[in-house]
Image: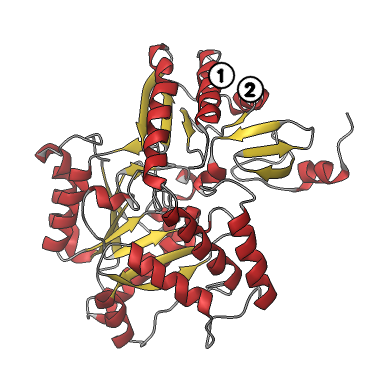
Amino acid sequence: MALAPWIEFDRGHLWHPYSAMGSGLPIFPVVSASGVRIRLADGRELIDGMSSWWSAIHGYNHPVLNRAVNQQLQAMAHVMFGGLTHQPAADLARRLVELTPQPLETVFFADSGSVSVEVALKMAIQYWHARGLPRKKRFLTVRNGYHGDTWHAMSVTDPENGMHTLFRGALPRQHFVPAPRCRFGEPCSPEDIAPMEQALIRVHDELAAVIIEPVVQGAGGMRFYSADYLRQLHALCERHDVLLILDEIATGFGRTGKMFACEHADIAPDILCVGKALTGGYMSLAATLTTQEVSQTISRGMPGLFMHGPTFMANPLACATALASLELLLESPWQGRIRQLEMGLKSGLAPCREMAWVSDVRVLGGIGVVELRDAVDLKTIQRSFVDAGVWVRPFGRLVYLMPPYVISEEDLQDLTGAVVEVVGGHAV
């Protein structure tokens, strides 16, 4: 069947994420999406198991979010945030301050999750500079982490096991310790926390902050680790006078069963990054929150302001949509939905445990992971999932699910059943 001209142009001229031109990897044209289904140009409908990279938590084409976009569009789509302000930004910031752990009270809006991490790192460096300690400009983190694809975000992503090894020699050099071995729900032993504690003792005088994804390491391996590790890390940062940055871009807004994953450890960071689900998947927006101590210290120091300002910062359309998405979430029985998701993922993916080529199956909240012993052939397995009527995007050795919160029990069974069928047919 002849391809539409725009599809032909796409294949010859458009770069997709983490792809090569002419690679032959399948690209599936989408013409619409509604609820938890994505409709392809050939008429097939796919149950979405990815929430469009973890963002579309309410599904697609939601009337509440559509209305928020349309209403804001009648007033203004965008206005610069330098020297001007608008109510959608103020209302969204107020709601974020209310939702996030105290004492996070100041909000900086950014364009994407990666940029929010860049903002967090710059905040930490400027904070210590304002305190007269400019030597504190390095960062400490754990291996198997992922914090984005922009420059300094790459520098705090695992330099060996991550996606950015090519840039290792050019990136700023940061400090890394082994990832936590203690699994979620288990205590953190002295041996688990020891590498982090020893690193803090050794290099705390040059550290601006520790940065970590709380409880769930996302694109670096979909690993779930002990909340007790996070509690002990928080205490160590306080003891050694080092800021703690938590990257909740993937975990924020309910995905793990708590509004924010750091609530599993009952801690609050000095700086918090959120994004992805913030707008319900409608458009790109992220935020970096920090304390009055950090923001006021930066504002009092040289040069008397925070040195960052994106062109589309606090875009009114995005802010209005994000506020509507948060209200929609809060008014819904989201905790119950996540519990149902967790139970459905556990039961639905359980048969994969019996497969010799599967090394682990793990579930936390609305996240289900099947880890294989060897990397998947994406070209083959992607087509198999589409033929099975689902949208699942594996990477490396991981086949994982992060469905929209609104998925029905029947659709979830079909989704997990497709994973069992496809993984079962792809023995390595």
Mark 1 — residue?
Answer: 422
Which residue is drawn at the image coordinates 15% and 37% (left, top)?
187
The crowding category of the residue bearing disc 1, from other C-alpha atoms within 10 Å (few below 14, some 14 to 19, many at least 20), is some
Q: Earlier in the sequence, mark 2 or mark 1?
A: 2
Residue 406: percent from left, percent from top: 51, 42
Q: Is residue 178 left or right of residue 71?
A: left
- 10 Å neighbourhood of mark 2: few (<14), some, or many (≥20)? some
* Coordinates of residue 337 in the picture (x, y in percent): 42, 40
In the rendered view, tell whether residue 360 sits above or below residue 5.
above
Residue at left offset 17%, top offset 50%: 231
Amino acid type assigned to the residue bearing label 1 in the image: Val
Tag 2 near tag 1, CB within 8 Å: yes
Residue 379 makes an appearance in the image = yes
Colouring chosen for the image of the structure: secondary structure
The residue singled out by tag 2 in the image is 388
Q: Position of residue 235 (x, y in %)?
A: 14, 56
Q: Nearer the viewer, mark 2 or mark 1?
A: 2
Q: Position of residue 400 (x, y in %)?
A: 47, 32
Looking at this view, is 139 or 212 the one in front? 212
Q: Secondary structure at mark 2?
A: loop
Residue under the image location 30 percent in, 44 percent down: 215
Q: Quadrant of residue 369?
A: top left
Q: Would residue 415 appear left or right of 274 to someone viewing this image? A: right
Total marks shown come to 2
Q: Tell me which amino acid carries mark 2.
A: Ala
Is the residue 162 above or below the residue 272 in the image? Answer: above
What is the quadrant of residue 139 in the picture? bottom left
Residue placed most toward the observer, 98 or 113:
98
Say the numbered circle drawn on residue 25.
none
Q: Tell me the CA gap for discs 2 and 1.
A: 8 Å
